[in-house]
Image (cartoon, grey):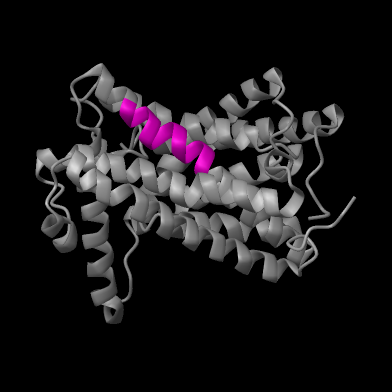
């Protein structure tokens, strides 16, 4: 098979080329999508230049439009382009040519559900962490960033119509599930694995970058743990569909809960379905069941001989 210019480069060069493709895609699509939307949503250019006021409900549809367009610009289109440059077959590059096994999809569901108590406990621990006194300025900046992210999430997810709920599912659950898995597990984890010749290093580094990218510091540890789960699902199975499903389920449940039960679940705590003290009681048994389900997934994946991770990119 003819080797492409991309695939013949060192993995570090492939990573740098991938970053360049991402930046160009973001720049071009942002220019092409933002300015027409200013007229479509009647948003003055001055509001964009000064920073959109997300407390103004009139600007929320425009901001949702930006969120969706940026998902395509950053996460969905670049991996497809990178896959075409690498193999002239994006779906093979992203390890999505083979549909997932229905039984293993059920196992992934069990893995995610049983992981929730441990993730919530880890989230509570993360929120209670304090930086040393000499880093007080950084900690205050982190708190402001977290508060702004929470306020923006609440503005996005507070809807009363079913149509608004479906847009939130698209924006918060469906597009991130595909896009973030395309980019982080489909591109970065794969190329890092080839570079380091060690997929465990690749999985951990990708999980750290995945969590840091969200800029929500008080949810860093649980999000990194999720990244590890997603990473090993892909590594063991050689199939990105399982991580996409797990990612979708993780985001879909709280979005749906906040829509159906707005008095019980707060939109600004999207990553937690429960954070009270009783969560600690279920963390250990839940984590043990999750580990058992992960091990079963590992064994079953080997027996099914699912598409192998791509080595010759």
Drawn side of residue 138 relative to residue 81, left or right: left
Q: Main secondary structure of the magenta part?
A: helix
Q: Is residue 38 left or right of residue 286?
A: left
Residue 62 spot, x, y in % from top left: 22, 42
Residue 300 in the image, given as x and y percentages of width and height: 79, 28
Q: Name the image quarter holding residue 97.
A: top right
Instruction: Name the side, left or right, on which 206 lies relative to 135.
Output: right
Viewer-nearest residue: 107 or 21: 21
Residue 304 lies in quadrant? top right
**Above or below for 257 versus 131:** above
**Looking at the image, can residue 155 be seen?**
no
Give the farthest residue toward the right.
Answer: 1
- Does 221 appear in magenta? no
Q: Residue at x 27, y 56 (%)?
A: 146
- Residue at the image position 30 percent from the left and 78 percent from the top: 135
Residue 66 % position (x, y): 30, 46
| Quadrant containing the C terminus in the rendered view | bottom right
Q: Residue 175: say if magenta.
A: yes
Closer-to-camera residue (29/123): 29
Residue placed at 58% from the left, 25% from the top? Answer: 110
Q: Is residue 180 left or right of residue 27?
A: right
Question: Can residue 116 be seen by looking at this rendering?
Answer: yes
Q: Is residue 240 above or below residue 129?
A: above
Q: Which residues are magenta?
A: 167-179
Q: How many marks?
A: 0
Q: Nearer the viewer, residue 185 or 125?
A: 185
- Residue drawn at point x = 63 percent, y = 32 percent: 242
Q: Position of residue 256 (x, y in %)?
A: 34, 24
Snapshot quadrant of residue 194: bottom right
């Amino acid at each position: 098979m003819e080797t492409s210019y991309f695939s013949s480069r060192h993995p570090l060069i492939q990573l740098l080329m991938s970053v360049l493709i991402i930046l160009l895609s973001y720049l071009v699509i942002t220019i092409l999508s933002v300015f027409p939307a200013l007229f479509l949503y009647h948003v003055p250019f001055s509001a964009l230049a000064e920073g959109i006021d997300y407390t103004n409900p009139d600007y929320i549809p425009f901001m949702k439009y930006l969120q969706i367009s940026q998902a395509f610009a950053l996460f969905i289109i670049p991996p497809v382009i990178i896959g075409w440059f690498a193999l002239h077959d994006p779906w093979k590059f992203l390890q999505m040519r083979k549909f997932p096994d229905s039984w293993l999809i059920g196992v992934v569901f069990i893995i995610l559900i049983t992981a929730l108590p441990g993730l919530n406990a880890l989230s509570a621990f993360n929120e209670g962490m304090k930086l040393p006194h000499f880093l007080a300025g950084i900690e205050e900046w982190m708190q402001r960033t977290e508060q702004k992210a929470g306020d923006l999430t609440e503005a996005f997810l507070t809807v009363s119509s079913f149509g608004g709920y479906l847009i939130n599912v698209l924006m918060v659950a469906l597009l991130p599930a595909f896009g973030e898995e395309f980019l982080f597990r489909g591109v970065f984890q794969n190329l890092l694995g080839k570079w380091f010749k060690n997929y465990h290093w690749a999985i951990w580094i990708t999980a750290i970058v995945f969590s840091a990218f969200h800029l929500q510091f008080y949810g860093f540890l649980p999000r990194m743990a999720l990244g590890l789960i997603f990473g090993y699902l892909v590594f063991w199975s050689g199939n990105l569909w399982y991580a996409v499903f797990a990612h979708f389920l993780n985001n879909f449940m709280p979005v749906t809960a906040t829509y159906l039960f707005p008095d019980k679940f707060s939109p600004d705590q999207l990553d937690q379905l429960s954070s009270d003290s009783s969560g600690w009681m279920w963390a250990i048994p839940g984590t043990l069941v999750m580990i058992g389900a992960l091990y079963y997934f590992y064994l079953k994946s080997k027996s099914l001989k699912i598409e192998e991770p791509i080595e010759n990119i």
